[in-house]
Image (cartoon, helix red, strand yellow):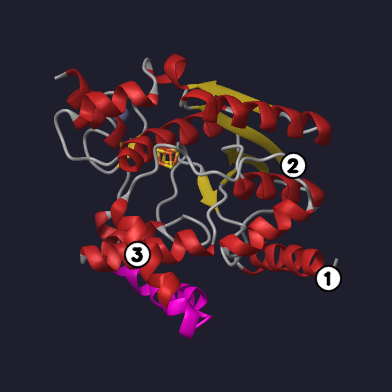
């Protein structure tokens, strides 16, 4: 009982401290059917926010079918509005088709391709649903891995979009993304979700094969054995330098609209349209 209360307090405190959302906001929760996003959805509702669920049916076989079924049941039980986007209807192809087509011509990873397309759909749909905020299930493990991955790539500019909320550039076509589970570890969320008996799959996506991320995750876990606060330290250290980073790269981050789809992006063509161009070439 105590664990659940502490966990919920941590999420509530993160929302408050970083001003992630207010009771006036309409929040769309980007759901996968997994433990993280289901926990975000449940807690935002529990805390009295105006939250709806949005899931992209990625059409990854049985895994997608089970996730969709679970989320439909969960939203029905908790009286939450569920918005479903079908990948093929939205983009014209399933994620597996796009991936295999692009990977025949490039070395892009599964998650890189899938992530670009998901972000494009989520922003567009959240805006169409008139959302003020787009909440995701990103947690402490994800963020500490992202920070180290960017560091090892030697590109500090990649970090400007991290943090508990996006917001270096405000644009009417861009819905601000928030991460209420920013300080919650994977283990804590797993424990919370299991104790709440959420109907979620605990097995990872069958297409997640990013060796770089897996390597980083394994290294962090090794260090965690001798330094249990390592993830928190990585994230807190990053948050101290984030304002400096954002300031430094502010002039590079002007948004414009994609020549093909009109969605907000940084170059003439957005990353999603770049991928589709590769697929069709
Ligand atoms: S793990 Fe990778 S491939 Fe699977 S849904 Fe997430 S981003 Fe897409
Ligand atoms: Zn585009």
Q: What secondary structure is found at the residue carrying circle 1?
A: helix
Give the image quarter of residue 185.
Answer: bottom right
Q: In this rendering, is residue 8 above or below 25?
A: below
Is mark 1 in CB contact (under 8 Å) with mark 3?
no
Residue found 82% across the figure and 36% down from its top: 78
Ligand 2 sits in which quadrant?
top left
Question: Which residue in the protein does label 2 denote?
Answer: 50
Magenta: main secondary structure equals: helix
Q: Alpha-carbon distance for marks 3 and 2?
A: 36 Å
17 displayed left or right of 274: right
Q: What secondary structure is found at the residue carrying circle 2?
A: strand
Label 1: few (<14), some or many (≥20) within 10 Å?
Answer: few
Q: Position of residue 213 (x, y in %)?
A: 35, 56
Question: Which residue in the protein does label 1 denote?
Answer: 2
The disc placed on residue 263 is: none
Mark 2 or 1, which is nearer the eye? 1
Residue found 73% across the figure and 49% down from its top: 44
Q: Alpha-carbon distance for marks 1 and 3?
A: 32 Å
Label 2: few (<14), some or many (≥20) within 10 Å?
Answer: some
Q: Is residue 236 magenta?
A: yes
Say whether disc 3 or disc 2 marks the residue closer to the N-terminus.
2
Say whether disc 2 or disc 1 marks the residue closer to the N-terminus.
1
Q: Which residues are magenta?
A: 223-248
Residue found 75% across the figure and 29% down from its top: 73
Q: Position of residue 171 (x, y in %)?
A: 43, 43
Give the image quarter of residue 31.
Answer: top right
Mark 3 or 2, which is nearer the eye? 3
Question: Which residue in the protein does label 3 denote?
Answer: 216
47 displayed left or right of 263: right
């Amino acid at each position: 009982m105590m664990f659940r209360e502490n966990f919920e307090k941590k999420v509530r405190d993160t929302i408050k401290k970083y001003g992630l959302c207010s009771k006036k906001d309409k929040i769309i929760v980007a759901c996968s059917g997994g433990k993280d996003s289901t926990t975000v959805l449940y807690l935002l509702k529990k805390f009295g926010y105006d939250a709806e669920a949005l899931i992209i049916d990625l059409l990854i076989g049985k895994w997608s079918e089970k996730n969709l079924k679970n989320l439909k049941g969960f939203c029905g039980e908790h009286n939450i509005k569920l918005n479903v986007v079908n990948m093929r209807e939205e983009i014209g192809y399933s994620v597996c088709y796009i991936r295999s087509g692009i990977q025949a011509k490039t070395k892009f990873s599964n998650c890189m391709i899938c992530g670009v397309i998901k972000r494009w759909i989520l922003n567009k749909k959240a805006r169409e649903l008139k959302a003020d905020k787009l909440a995701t299930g990103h947690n402490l493990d994800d963020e500490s891995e992202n920070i180290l991955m960017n560091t090892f790539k030697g590109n500090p500019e990649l970090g400007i979009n991290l943090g508990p909320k996006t917001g270096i550039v405000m644009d009417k076509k861009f819905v601000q993304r928030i991460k209420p589970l920013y300080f919650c570890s994977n283990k804590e969320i797993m424990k919370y979700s299991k104790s709440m008996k959420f109907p979620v799959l605990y097995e990872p996506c069958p297409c997640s094969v990013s060796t770089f991320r897996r390597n980083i995750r394994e290294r962090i876990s090794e260090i965690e054995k001798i330094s249990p606060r390592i993830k928190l330290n990585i994230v807190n250290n990053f948050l101290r330098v984030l304002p400096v980073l954002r300031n430094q790269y502010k002039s590079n981050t002007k948004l414009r609209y994609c020549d093909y789809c009109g969605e907000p992006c940084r170059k003439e063509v957005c990353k999603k349209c770049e991928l589709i161009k590769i697929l069709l070439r």
